[in-house]
Image: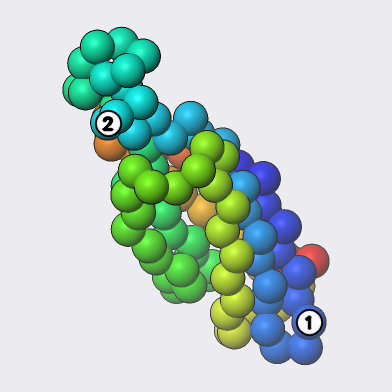
Amino acid sequence: MKIKAKIKGDIVDVKVMAQHEMMTYDVAEKKTGDKNNANFITHINAVVNGKVVFDMSTSQFLSKNPIFKFKFKGAKAGDELVMTWVDLKGNTKVSKSKIK
């Protein structure tokens, strides 16, 4: 994942690109002949200092390499933001970034 987290005042502004193919059921059937080959991000969350600051369940209707933007309070420059996504097949990706 590519993460940009910048603090302005007391609000942290985050932009994340989650690198994933995001293959829907229809695309999987067209490409492979089997809907069971579908795979897309189903859950994504962000944690700072042990506190969940972003949590989202997703579906197959996101684009390839989706971009997420969100804001939150309660962090300072230098804190570590940990982003995690899980896809339909159970694969997990964890990325970390310092808040600037």
| Callout 1 secondary element | strand
Q: Taking 12 as reference, is 85 left or right?
A: left
Q: Residue furthest top?
A: 32
User: 75 above or below 95?
Assistant: below
Which residue is drawn at the image coordinates 75% and 76% (left, top)? Answer: 7
| Nearer-the-camera pick, 49 or 20 | 20
Q: Quadrant of residue 1?
A: top right
Q: Kindly identify which numbered label has been placed on residue 37.
A: none
| Nearer-the-camera pick, 77 or 93 | 93
Which residue is drawn at the image coordinates 34% and 33% (left, top)? Answer: 24
Q: Residues within 10 Å of mark 2 (few under 14, many from 20)?
A: some
| Nearer-the-camera pick, 75 or 14 | 14
Residue beneath disc 2 = 25
| Callout 2 secondary element | helix
Residue beneath disc 1 = 8
Tell me the amino acid under the disc marked 1: Lys
Expressed as whole percent of the image width and height from the top left, the position of residue 15 reads: 66, 60
Q: Residues within 10 Å of mark 1 (few under 14, many from 20)?
A: few
User: 27 above or below 3?
Assistant: above
Q: Taking 63 as reference, is 71 left or right?
A: right
Whether residue 84 is visible: yes
